[in-house]
Image (cartoon, rainbow, N blue to C red):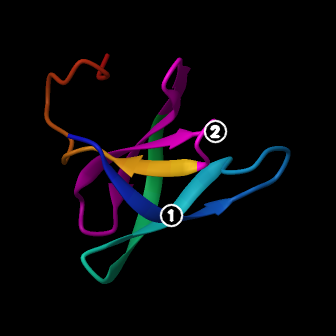
């Protein structure tokens, strides 16, 4: 299930170009690396790894101007290749 989330992102040529951190349950979680990114009809997708080694999928929906957080990354998930 995707949940709305606040994201700090680098915005260069376009808004929300690259996430740098997100806020979850009152905690700022820094993104160490964007491992993969792609575009779909749902928006811009980012598979990220945090400083604690956890993986998440963040999605930026340009139409609603909203970021969403998917559940923690699981091996074999449909977006993994």
Displayed quadrant of residue 28: bottom left
The answer for how far apart the CA atoms under marks 2 and 1 are is 13 Å
The quarter holding residue 75 reads: top left
Q: Quadrant of the N terminus?
A: top left
Q: Secondary structure at mark 2?
A: loop
Label 2–label 1 contact, CB within 8 A: no
* Badge number at residue 48: none
- Sequence-first tag of 2 and 1: 1
Q: Is residue 74 left or right of residue 24?
A: left
Extent of the magenta region:
37-65
- Residue 29 x, y percent position in the rendering: 36, 73
Q: Quadrant of the C terminus?
A: top left
- Residue placed most toward the observer, 71 or 51: 71
Q: Nearer the viewer, mark 2 or mark 1?
A: 2
Q: Which residue is mark 2?
A: 62
Q: Position of residue 8 (x, y in %)?
A: 57, 67
Left or right: 77 with respect to 64? left
- Residue at 31 percent across and 22 percent down: it is 79
Residue beneath label 1, please? 7
Residue under the point 21% across and 41% down: 73
């Amino acid at each position: 299930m995707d949940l709305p989330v606040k994201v700090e992102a680098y915005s260069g040529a376009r808004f929300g170009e690259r996430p740098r951190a997100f806020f979850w349950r009152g905690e700022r979680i820094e993104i160490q690396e964007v491992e993969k990114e792609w575009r779909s009809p749902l928006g811009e997708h980012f598979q990220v790894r945090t400083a604690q080694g956890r993986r998440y999928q963040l999605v930026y929906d340009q139409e609603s101007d909203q970021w969403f957080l998917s559940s923690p990354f699981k091996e074999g998930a449909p977006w993994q290749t």
